[in-house]
């Protein structure tokens, strides 16, 4: 059986604060050991995917960029 509930962050915190200390400790243990490590691994993976799919310059584009920067830096208003 699965139940999905859409509650806000503040409501979730209020519900957790009403739990007995033992249940809060159990929840903390489960989140630390299982959930956070798994979530961090997935987030890192998503970030790595983002970086790997990002556009990159070709060598020719990079050389043109360096040349353009040099020209912009040497140009002065008189």
Image (cartoon, rainbow, N blue to C red):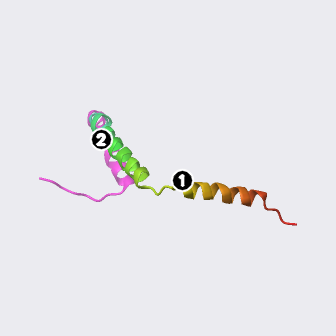
Bin the neighbour count of mark 1 within 10 Å (Cα to Cα): few under 14, some 14-19, many 20 and up.
few
Label 1, label 2: how far apart the Cα atoms are: 38 Å
Using the image, determine if residue 39 lies above or below residue 5. Answer: above
Left or right: where does residue 69 sit relative to residue 48?
right
Nearer-the-camera pick, 37 or 61: 61
Q: How many marks?
A: 2
Which image quarter holds the C terminus?
Answer: bottom right
Query: At which x and y percent is residue 32?
Result: 32, 35
Q: Are marks 1 and 2 in contact (CB under 8 Å)?
A: no
Q: Nearer the viewer, mark 1 or mark 2?
A: 1
Q: Which residue does the numbered mark 1 point to in the structure image? A: 59
Residue 19: x and y in percent read 29, 41
What percent of the width, then of the height, locates residue 6? Answer: 29, 59
Image position, residue 50 (x, y; %)? 41, 53
In this view of the protein, which residue sits in the foreground, 51 or 42?
51
Q: Residue at x 79, y 62 (%)?
A: 75
Kindly give the residue lying farthest to the left in the view shown. 1
Check disc 2 and report the residue beneath it. Answer: 38
- Which of 4 and 63 lies nearest the eye of the viewer? 63
Is 2 included in the stretch rendered in magenta?
A: yes
Residue 16 part of the magenta-drawn span: yes
């Amino acid at each position: 059986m699965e139940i999905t509930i859409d509650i806000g962050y503040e409501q979730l915190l209020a519900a957790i604060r009403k739990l007995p200390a033992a249940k809060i400790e159990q929840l903390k243990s489960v989140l630390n050991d299982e959930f956070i490590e798994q979530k961090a691994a997935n987030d890192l993976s998503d970030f790595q995917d983002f970086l790997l799919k990002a556009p990159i310059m070709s060598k020719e584009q990079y050389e043109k960029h360096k040349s353009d920067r040099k020209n912009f830096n040497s140009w002065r208003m008189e």
